[in-house]
Amino acid sequence: MKWIFWPAAVVAGFFVSAAIAEDQSVEELKRDAVSRLVEAHDVALPVYIGRVYVKQAALTAARDLLAERGKAAGLDRKIWNLDAPQWQDAERELMQGTDALIQRKVASGFWVQEAWSEQVSTILNGEEADEIAVHFRTEGGELQRRVIEWFVGELTLQTYTFTDRLKYGVPGSEQEMRDLQVATYEAKSHFAPIYDLTKYDNTMRFASGEAGIKYFRMMAIQGVNLVHQHLEEVAEEARKTIRARAPLVDPYVDHALKP
């Protein structure tokens, strides 16, 4: 009986190992498809929107803090404001490290790809991810990808502008705003205001197929939300850092109080 059982166990072990190897191969293929799909995207708009938003969030936190400390000390706003030398010196000290934070956690764009990759892996299977990745390499697919990126960028920007969390003309964020305007112009330059996608058969299949519908819905909802979540986390980190430096403002306030 032992002699009969041993070959059976070897055969069973072989099939189990083969099944595990096949599962691993399927997962590897899916990871490759997801990677190709996400890396095809240009993440410039979320990145440049994020640079403006985090910079303005930090500036707002610093200026609110300066106004509070000045008011508590009895400083008149006529002498304690954005144009006052002591205010400007204190603001620079509060803002130290903000640009480095933005460079580290926003400017690279890796965080966008990472967030979208996780979501794509959850929503699409390997075949669907591969189908879209291949589609995006075609002429019509590339144009369709850019339309999706523009749509995501527009939704993200509206999230901040309609709630007054991102504004035009904020002193101290001029460079970031100019960079965003350039990135927006560049993204928009790839397609006309009205473009006929029906001349590409594959774009119609993508727009009406299950994989395409799932992907567009994901980008319009989870894709935008994930960008928003990350930028909020970075902005809050900037705000906390500035609030923790509140005592650094006092010497500048004391100096402004002197006649």
Image (cartoon, rainbow, N blue to C red):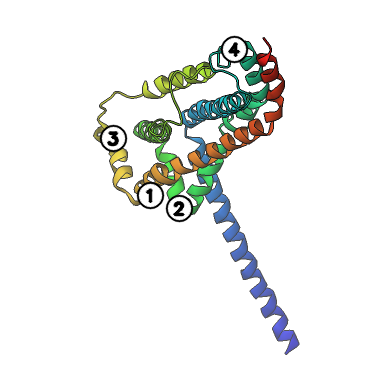
Provide residue 187's location: percent of width, then percent of height: 41, 24
Label 2, on which residue? 123
At label 1, the amino acid type is: Lys
Q: Could you tell me how far apart the alpha carbons at marks 1 and 4 are, in whole angstroms?
A: 54 Å
Q: CA distance from mark 2 to mark 3?
A: 26 Å
Mark 4: few, some, or many residues within 10 Å (few <14, many ≥20)?
few
Marks 2/3 in contact by CB < 8 Å: the verdict is no
Tag 4 residue: 84
Q: Position of residue 14 (x, y in %)?
A: 65, 69
**Viewer-proximal residue among 156 and 11:** 156
Q: Nearer the viewer, residue 84 or 165?
A: 84
Looking at marks 2 and 4 on the same chain, the residue that comes earlier in the sequence is marked by 4
Task: State which tag comes first along the sequence, 2 or 3.
Answer: 2
Can you see residue 125? no
Q: Position of residue 236 (x, y in %)?
A: 58, 37
In the rendered view of the protein, which quadrant contains the N terminus? Answer: bottom right
Which badge, 1 or 2, comes first in the chain's sequence? Answer: 2
Tag 4: residue type? Ala
Amino acid at pointer 2: Ile
Gap between marks 1 and 3 measured at Cα: 20 Å
Question: How far is the residue under mark 4 from the one under mark 3?
Answer: 60 Å
Tag shown at residue 146: none
| Residue 200 badge | 3
- Residue underneath mark 1: 214
Callout 4: SS: loop
